[in-house]
């Protein structure tokens, strides 16, 4: 195993350990919320999922620009990795939000502006992955993926700022000054933990995509030779 891969796995290990510590503090040490009680404890995974999910999409946006600019397979691989990990966190965000909404709002789902834009964000990036699956040529696939990623990213700032721009059931973003210090620590630990896990997962997914790209480069001459042979029959 290369030294680089060992360091990447270290990110995942440290992230997992921090997530266990942060979750323990959030479940058993931090006090219950004054109004929501123990229901509030889901925020220790809900908010880190939201923050890191949008951060993944931000990384994907940057990787997509680099992919168009440099036309290197590594940027395409990183774009895919960031989108897929971001989509998983996005899905967890929607599920966790629904679990929280049932006891607090009385419904599993409401077409609130934050919820709606978050769902659209998931569908847009899932659409990028679906589009990618239909393109066989690696270069064309990378270009289309990058363009679609840049377009899909338009919704990410809307998700973040919508509670400030429009009326919403969802609260405006809190700050450490408005949250109990006992609640801030597990939030920070879990946020850092998921961020480290994101680095590990994106790197692993990008590595698999590079292997796929290399295999396509090897298989392409053989495929073309086969097609050419059939044409000459």
Image (spheres, rainbow, N blue to C red):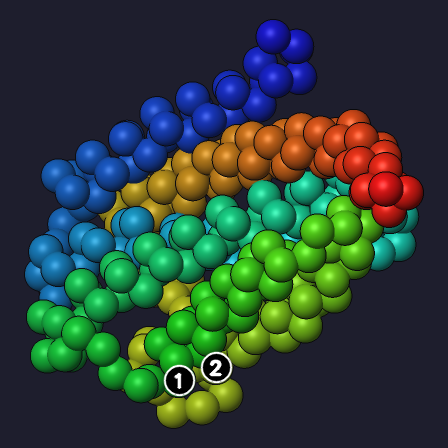
Marks 2 and 1 sit apart, C-alpha to C-alpha, by 7 Å
Would you say residue 64 is visible in this rendering?
no
Count residues near mark 1 (Cα–Cα under 10 Å), then give few for <14, some for 14-19, many for 20+.
some
Q: Which residue corresponds to the image point at 12% horizontal and 66% vertical from the top-left?
A: 36
Q: Which residue: 17% across, 74% down?
A: 108
What quarter of the picture does the N terminus occupy? Answer: top right
Where does the image place residue 153, in percent across and percent down from the top left?
62, 68
Which residue is depicted at the point 16% across and 42% down? 27
Query: Residue 117 vs residue 98: left or right?
Result: right
Q: Earlier in the sequence, mark 2 or mark 1?
A: 1
Q: Which residue is mark 2?
A: 162
**Which mark is on residue 113?**
1
Between 185 and 99, the one lying in front of the other is 99
Secondary structure at badge 1 equals helix
Q: Is residue 184 left or right of residue 192?
A: left
Relative vertical location of residue 210 with respect to residue 126 in this rendering, above or below: above
Farthest top residue in view? 1
| Position of residue 46 measured from the top left corner of the image (x, y, whole percent) | 31, 56
- Is 95 drawn above or below residue 113 in the view shown? above
The percent coordinates of residue 161 (x first, y second) are 52, 77
Q: How many marks?
A: 2
Query: Against 168, is 206 above or below?
Result: above
Q: Is mark 2 in CB contact (under 8 Å) with mark 1? A: yes
Relative side of 70 to 91, left or right:
right
């Amino acid at each position: 195993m290369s030294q680089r891969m060992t360091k990447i796995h270290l990110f995942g290990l440290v992230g997992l350990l921090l997530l266990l510590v942060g979750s323990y503090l959030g479940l058993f040490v931090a006090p219950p919320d004054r109004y929501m009680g123990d229901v509030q404890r889901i925020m220790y995974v809900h908010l880190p999922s939201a923050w890191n999910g949008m951060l993944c999409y931000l990384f994907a946006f940057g990787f997509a620009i680099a992919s168009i600019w440099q036309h290197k397979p590594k940027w395409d691989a990183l774009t895919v990795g960031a989108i897929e990990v971001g989509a998983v966190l996005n899905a967890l965000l929607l599920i966790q939000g629904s679990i929280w909404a049932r006891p607090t709002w009385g419904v599993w789902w409401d077409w609130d502006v934050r919820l709606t834009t978050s769902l659209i964000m998931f569908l847009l990036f899932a659409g990028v992955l679906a589009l990618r699956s239909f393109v066989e040529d690696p270069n064309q696939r990378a270009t289309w993926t990058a363009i679609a990623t840049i377009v899909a990213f338009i919704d990410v700032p809307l998700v973040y700022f919508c509670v400030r721009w429009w009326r919403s059931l969802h609260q405006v973003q809190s700050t450490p000054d408005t949250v109990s210090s006992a609640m801030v620590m597990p939030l920070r630990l879990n946020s850092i933990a998921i961020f480290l896990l994101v680095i590990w997962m994106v790197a692993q997914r990008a590595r698999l995509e590079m292997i796929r790209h290399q295999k396509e480069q090897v298989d392409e001459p053989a495929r073309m030779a086969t097609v050419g042979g059939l044409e000459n029959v």
